[in-house]
Amino acid sequence: MTQTLPRDARQPRRLRRWPLLLLLLALSYAVAAVGGLASSDAASTYRSLDRPAWAPPSWLFGPVWTVLYATIAVSAWLVLRRRPLAEARAETGAWSAQLALNLAWTPLFFGAGQYGLAFLDICLLLAAIGTTMVLFRRSSRAAWLLLVPYALWVLYAASLNFAIWQLNG
């Protein structure tokens, strides 16, 4: 008599990992969508602010963040496909914290016009990204590398946030 395995057990392990990637992408882009809802007039608000000469044009933010949210999700996926969630609690916690801080920034900056609080948030975000990178590096060099552009862009955004706070405060 042969034993029939559940359908999931018959699938190659790598195929079972794709739903996790889709979930992580959905979470990352949900943060983008909620941030967008919180600041539907962000482009016009940004254009109306006094900005430093090195500030990018408003149209650049959408394409950059579209790519960065994908790299944020894929980096977590690279870690979580190697280790069960129960064994990656620190990594998952740091990743979730940076995503939450990322989500908080847009309503603070654009929705409430609280440039100082937004700067505090983005500084905490940088710390959370750094922590995530350190933890991810232990599991996957590729996951760590995928977060480098994110960290650099947020560092640039923090500098821009500070300059706008000083010019418009």
Image: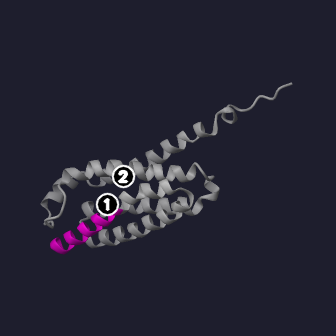
CB contact under 8 Å: marks 2 and 1:
yes
Q: Nearer the viewer, residue 2 or 146?
A: 146
Left or right relative to 26: residue 107: left
Mark 1 Cα shell of 10 Å, populated few (<14), some (14-19), many (≥20): some
| Residue denoted by label 2 | 68
Q: In which quarter of the image is the C terminus?
A: bottom left
Left or right relative to 110: residue 25: right
Picture coordinates of residue 108 (x, y %)? 30, 64
Furthest residue to the right?
1
Residue 114 in view = no
Please provide the residue range marked out in magenta.
152-169
Mark 2 Cα shell of 10 Å, populated few (<14), some (14-19), many (≥20): many
Q: Nearer the viewer, residue 61 or 137?
A: 137
Q: Which SS does the magenta portion mostly show?
A: helix
For image coordinates 57% across by 42% down, the residue present is 17
- The part of the image, by quadrant, that contains residue 100 is bottom left
- The part of the image, by quadrant, that contains residue 47 is bottom left
Q: In which quarter of the image is the N terminus?
A: top right
Residue 42 in view = yes
- The part of the image, by quadrant, that contains residue 121 is bottom left
Q: Which amino acid does label 1 sit on?
A: Trp
Left or right relative to 116: residue 75: right
For image coordinates 50% across by 63% down, the residue present is 94
The secondary element bearing badge 1 is classed as helix
For image coordinates 52% across by 60% down, the residue present is 136
